[in-house]
Amino acid sequence: MPHNTPSYNHGFSFAELQTVDGLTRLDATFLAFLRQHNGALAERLAAYRAGHDGLTPADSSEFLIVLATHLETFLAGLFGIDPEVTAARTATRSHDPVFAFKKQFVQRRARRRLLKKEDIESFAELDAWLSDALRAAGLDDAQGSASAAGDRMSGAAVADRELAVARYAVQLLADEPGHTGEIEKLVRWCLRALTSDEGRTATRGWGPASRTIVNAPGPRRSRSAAA
């Protein structure tokens, strides 16, 4: 049975990419691509490879993250998958408000107050306030309050509710001095979501692997091989 041998952009073939000479040419092609799109970054990469970059470990990590975006674009062009990569990037960036919400409200504010014995409103009361706030901000997810929706929420509805709350939190942080009251109330909502059965049930499915906001992790950074 005949086989279709894949071919790639920049004149590369599948067979060539299995050879040292092919990978050497691939590297040279990437460096030319990088010089064309970001000459300063190409110079930093040359210094990094030569061991003359003078970067701290933290600076080195940031450099590799920036470089990785250009490498991703180059590889997408090489394999002809630009639309798929663009769609994946858009989907990933749509979660940025969720990461910001969990970092700024759940981790930095609410969790630090878990050991305090505070007399605050019930989750149902706070969640009703939050639903009103989302509607006023034009972020109503059309699913009603989390406590009212309960177990009838579909996965899509849960995701919509989480994203709506996260976008509201980001809006508040954009003018923190002007929204101190709302920020404090949203922190109390997070506290009830973390500590009450009703809150944990309402936020089940928020984050990976159907976790609640109690233990949902924040974003992870990946490293790129630039050597």
Image (cartoon, helix red, strand yellow):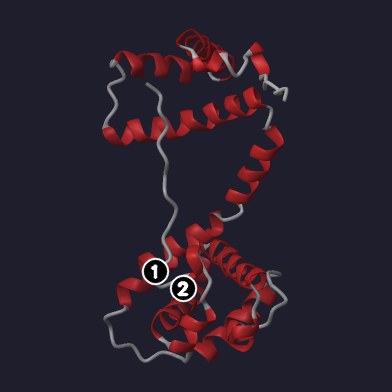
Gap in angstroms between the C-alphas marked 2 and 1: 6 Å
Query: In the rendered view, would you say 141 is above or below 218?
Result: below
Residue 37 quadrant: top right
Q: Quadrant of the C terminus?
A: top left
How far across and how far down the image is residue 197, in percent?
A: 44, 88
Q: Residue at x 59, y 14 (%)?
A: 36
Under mark 2, the amino acid is Thr
How far across and how far down the image is residue 32, in percent?
A: 55, 11
Q: Residue at x 41, y 18 (%)?
A: 45
Q: Quadrant of the N terminus?
A: top right
Query: In the rendered view, would you say 158 is above or below 227?
Result: below
Query: In the rendered view, would you say 87 is above or below 57?
Result: below
How far across and how far down the image is residue 102, in percent?
A: 45, 64
Q: Residue at x 46, y 91 (%)?
A: 121
How far across and how far down the image is residue 28, in percent?
A: 51, 10
Are the two marked residues, 2 and 1, in contact with CB atoms closer than 8 angstroms?
Answer: yes
Residue 141 quadrant: bottom right
Q: Residues within 10 Å of mark 1 (few under 14, many from 20)?
A: few
Q: Which residue was labeled with disc 1?
A: 215
Query: In the rendered view, would you say 163 is above or below 227?
Result: below
Under mark 1, the amino acid is Asn
Residue 60 quadrant: top left
Q: Which residue was labeled with disc 2?
A: 212
Q: How many marks?
A: 2
Q: Secondary structure at mark 2?
A: loop
Q: Left or right: where does residue 162 sit relative to residue 196?
A: right
Q: Secondary structure at mark 1?
A: loop
Q: Left or right: where does residue 41 sit relative to residue 95?
A: left
